[in-house]
């Protein structure tokens, strides 16, 4: 390493977010960047730790010590070469990954100040695009055709690798543009969609063909026209909440708000009847995960009156460690996102009983505080009521309770499933890793 003692002398420095009073008025990315000098200084903190757990923790096997060292020494081109050797789209993970590598960093395990790998990753990639280090590859074709159904992170990663192996790759997607949840789920204030378009231009120049607004229903019949087919259709079915009043106007799945808002920013117009908006409304978000957080930030930017977020599970420990979930597990600790900072009432151990309304429109939600008690038979704890039910005033409810894992029939031998469609809803980085693994399996099958 270039500076083996930097971790003893330099503290972790994050770029931070734009000021709240500024960012809540637009959908521009909230995260800022460090200047080049400070970014290289942060890269120098990556110590010569001997056993880099970051390799193990990253689903893609990113070699953070190697590209951090190159970044510290100012060799941005080498840093990108090392980074892109394992990660096909570091501009995505550099923005939206929860940085499993940082949770495994030796500096995190000892000092709770891990190396800023995620931010370094984004900075390296932006530098590579800015300086023209992104090479367009034109692989020699091997005469075989592969279809990828689904242009989300898993499908794009599979298509990227298969294309470089020499296969003629065609990507199909039911939506009007590529990205999957990167485009239609993650808000622009976390991932500007021009970042996706920039990468799509590179993939197109490398020979991948894209066909949008195309849904594939019969995969068995479809597969007969290709040497192999990769299914990367994600988890389209959101988990619903079937309690009385679900039919009231104002109760929506989270993606109904998020995907519509992203399409509006892309120029699509909706009628007043179709538009899902938080403007002037009291908003209740049901679900305590990242999708719920995205709903909070979107509601603020749409001009909501108030936002409350409830979660049926207990409040996580404050951290930085979780005594019930120690290393090497991912720490399940209390998390405050940029959207939470913008203003939100957060409550835990709250069960939803009923949606209340008048004249077919939502006016409030009846909820019940609960406790979780050990199950004498083992297994899932038992939910028991605590106190009296109460009513939370709301004119808009957003259900952000996750997604259901798809069930697949038996497919022909040349059909492969990857990403969330195979494993259930998870992280972008895991979807990309699954896409790469599936590309290798396809290559082995066709050889």
Image: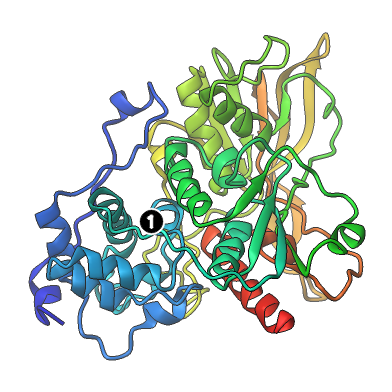
- Label count reads 1
Quarter containing the C terminus: bottom right
Q: Is residue 212 above or below residue 89?
A: above
Mark 1 residue crowding within 10 angstroms, few (<14) / some (14–19) / many (20+): many
Q: Quadrant of residue 175?
A: top right
Q: Give the image's coloring scheme.
A: rainbow
**Furthest residue toward bottom:** 50
Q: Is residue 228 above or below residue 48?
A: above
Give percent across and percent down for residue 381. Answer: 73, 65
Quarter containing the N terminus: bottom left
Q: Is residue 354 visible?
A: yes
Who is closer to the viewer here, 384 or 286? Answer: 286
Residue hosting label 1? 94
Give percent across and percent down for residue 271. Answer: 68, 11
Q: Is residue 107 visible?
A: no
Q: Is residue 399 above or below residue 22?
A: below
Q: Quadrant of residue 82?
A: bottom left
Give me the residue at 55% from left, 30% from top. Answer: 262
Who is closer to the viewer here, 229 or 96? Answer: 229
Give me the residue at 78% from left, 47% from top. Answer: 237
Apparent side of residue 203 relative to residue 47 in the rendered image (left or right) = right
Apparent side of residue 111 relative to residue 102 in the rendered image (left or right) = left
Who is closer to the viewer here, 440 or 393? Answer: 440
Instruction: Identify the element where label 1 is drawn.
Output: helix
Apparent side of residue 201 relative to residue 142 in the rendered image (left or right) = left
């Amino acid at each position: 390493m270039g500076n083996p003692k930097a971790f003893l002398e330099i503290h972790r420095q994050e770029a931070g977010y734009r000021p709240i009073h500024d960012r809540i008025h637009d959908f521009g990315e909230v995260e800022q960047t460090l200047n080049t000098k400070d970014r290289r200084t942060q890269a120098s903190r990556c110590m010569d730790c001997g056993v880099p757990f970051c390799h193990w923790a990253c689903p893609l096997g990113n070699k953070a010590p190697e590209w951090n060292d190159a970044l510290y020494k100012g060799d941005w081109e080498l840093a990108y070469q090392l980074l892109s050797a394992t990660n096909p789209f570091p501009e995505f993970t550099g923005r939206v990954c929860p940085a499993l590598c940082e949770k495994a960093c030796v500096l995190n395990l000892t000092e709770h100040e891990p190396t800023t790998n995620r931010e370094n990753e984004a900075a390296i990639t932006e530098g590579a695009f800015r300086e023209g280090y992104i090479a367009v590859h034109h692989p020699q074709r091997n005469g075989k055709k592969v279809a990828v159904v689904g242009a989300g992170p898993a499908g794009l990663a599979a298509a990227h690798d298969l294309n470089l192996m020499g296969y003629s790759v065609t990507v199909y997607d039911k939506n009007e543009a590529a990205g999957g949840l990167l485009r239609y789920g993650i808000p622009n204030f976390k991932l500007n969609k021009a970042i996706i378009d920039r990468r799509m231009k590179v993939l197109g120049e490398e020979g991948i063909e894209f066909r949008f607004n195309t849904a594939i229903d019969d995969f068995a019949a479809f597969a007969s026209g290709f040497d192999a087919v990769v299914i990367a259709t994600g988890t389209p079915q959101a988990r619903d909440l079937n309690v009385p009043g679900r039919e009231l106007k104002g109760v929506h799945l989270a993606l109904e708000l998020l995907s519509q808002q992203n399409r509006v920013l892309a120029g699509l117009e909706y009628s007043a009847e179709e538009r899902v908006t938080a403007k002037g409304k009291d908003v209740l978000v049901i679900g305590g995960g990242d999708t719920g957080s995205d709903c909070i930030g979107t509601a603020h930017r749409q001009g909501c009156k108030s936002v409350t977020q409830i979660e049926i599970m207990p409040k996580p420990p404050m951290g930085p460690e979780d005594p019930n979930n120690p290393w090497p597990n991912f720490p399940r600790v209390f998390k405050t996102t940029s959207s939470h900072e913008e203003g939100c009432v957060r409550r835990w151990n709250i069960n939803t009983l009923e949606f209340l309304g008048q004249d077919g429109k939502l006016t409030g939600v009846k909820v019940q505080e609960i406790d979780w008690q050990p199950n004498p038979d083992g297994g899932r704890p038992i939910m028991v009521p605590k106190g009296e039910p109460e009513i939370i005033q709301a004119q808009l409810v957003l259900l952000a309770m996750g997604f259901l894992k798809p069930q697949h029939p038996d497919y022909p031998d040349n059909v492969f499933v990857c990403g969330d469609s195979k494993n259930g809803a998870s992280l972008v980085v895991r979807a990309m890793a699954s896409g790469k693994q599936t590309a290798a399996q396809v290559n082995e099958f066709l050889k």
